[in-house]
């Protein structure tokens, strides 16, 4: 099967999942699943994780195809770029609460993130061409590109939460993950105004492997004694 056919099937599956597995309810400010019931924040994040896992598997498959000569380096790079674009966009849409809520600025942020990822991918391709990266190393390295998608979700989520009137944020550590000192420091700062802390994967040694979460809160009005 050609890389183009593989990518077409992958794209069709991701789009079909997006259409059937969730929708955002603007009245409640929450997500609903296919059965109409509200989804927890962790369930929404699991939707994104599912796309990341599928993307990682596809990127590794493209890399295996390259290693056995089924596709060229240019075809590999093009296929990886398109797959990354698709899932970064999907993650941002989920974070924002739907395509219809996306502004031109929101789309611009996705484009900026993708340009950074494409620049890294170009360097990766040069390393492969020059023989500086073995194919086993490449299979491990390509997985980091899939993990970077989580950043698009959190960026979109932050935008949505501000639109809904949330003004505070708190970094939450994953109890099952190993955290860098940066993430430990961010979590230790507690509840702070939105924008005071980087989002998961930003400005931390974990980078794309960051498993932190963000909890958003509304500013509580002080009680005035009468």
Image (tube, rainbow, N blue to C red):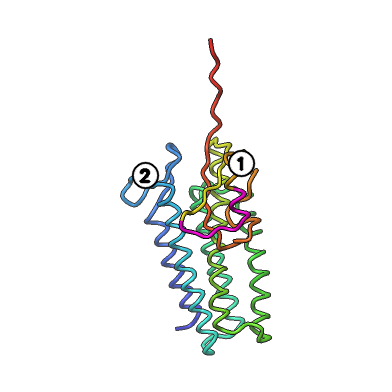
Residue 166 drawn at (x, y percent): 55, 37
Q: Name the residue under label 1.
A: 194
Nearer to me, 181 or 157: 181
Nearer to me, 15 or 133: 133
Label 2 SS: loop
Q: Residue at x 42, y 56 (%)?
A: 46
The quadrant the N terminus occupies is: bottom left
Q: How crowded is mark 1: few (under 14 residues within 10 Å), some or many (20 or more)?
A: some
Taking 224 as reference, is 23 above or below it? Answer: below
- Stretch of the chain drawn in magenta: 176-186
Residue 101 drawn at (x, y percent): 53, 46
Q: Which residue is drawn at 54% across and 89% down?
A: 69
Taking 3 as reference, is 211 above or below it? Answer: above
Residue 150 drawn at (x, y percent): 53, 58
Label 1 SS: loop
Taking 187 as reference, is 130 above or below it? Answer: below
Q: Which residue is drawn at 51% across and 88% down?
A: 70
Numbered label tally: 2
How far separated are the C-alphas under marks 1 and 2?
Answer: 25 Å
Residue 67 drawn at (x, y percent): 54, 86
Badge number at residue 52: none
Q: Mark 2 points at which residue?
A: 38
* Label located before the other in sequence (1 or 2): 2
Instruction: Check residue 9 for magenta coloring.
Output: no
Q: Of discs 1 and 2, which sits in the foreground?
A: 1
Q: How crowded is mark 2: few (under 14 residues within 10 Å), some or many (20 or more)?
A: some
Q: Looking at the image, do the residues carrying marks 1 and 2 touch, with CB atoms under 8 Å apart?
A: no
In which quadrant of the rendered view does residue 28 lie?
Answer: top left
């Amino acid at each position: 099967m050609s890389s183009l056919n593989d990518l077409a099937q992958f794209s069709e599956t991701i789009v079909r999942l997006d259409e059937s597995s969730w929708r955002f309810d603007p009245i409640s400010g929450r997500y609903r699943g296919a059965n109409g019931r509200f989804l927890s924040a962790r369930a929404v994040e699991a939707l994104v994780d599912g796309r990341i896992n599928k993307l990682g598997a596809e990127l590794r498959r493209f890399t295996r195809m390259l290693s056995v000569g089924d596709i060229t380096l240019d075809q590999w790079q093009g296929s990886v770029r398109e797959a990354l674009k698709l899932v970064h966009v999907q993650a941002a849409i989920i974070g924002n609460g739907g395509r219809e809520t996306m502004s031109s600025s929101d789309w611009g942020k996705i484009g900026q993130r993708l340009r950074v990822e494409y620049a890294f991918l170009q360097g990766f391709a040069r390393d492969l061409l020059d023989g500086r990266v073995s194919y086993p190393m490449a299979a491990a390295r390509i997985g980091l590109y899939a993990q970077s998608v989580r950043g698009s979700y959190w960026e979109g989520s932050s935008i949505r939460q501000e639109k809904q009137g949330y003004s505070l944020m708190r970094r939450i550590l994953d109890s099952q993950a190993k955290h860098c000192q940066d993430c430990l420091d961010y979590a230790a700062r507690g509840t702070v105004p939105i924008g005071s802390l980087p989002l998961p994967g930003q400005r931390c040694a974990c980078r794309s492997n960051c498993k932190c979460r963000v909890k958003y809160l509304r500013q509580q009005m002080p009680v005035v004694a009468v």
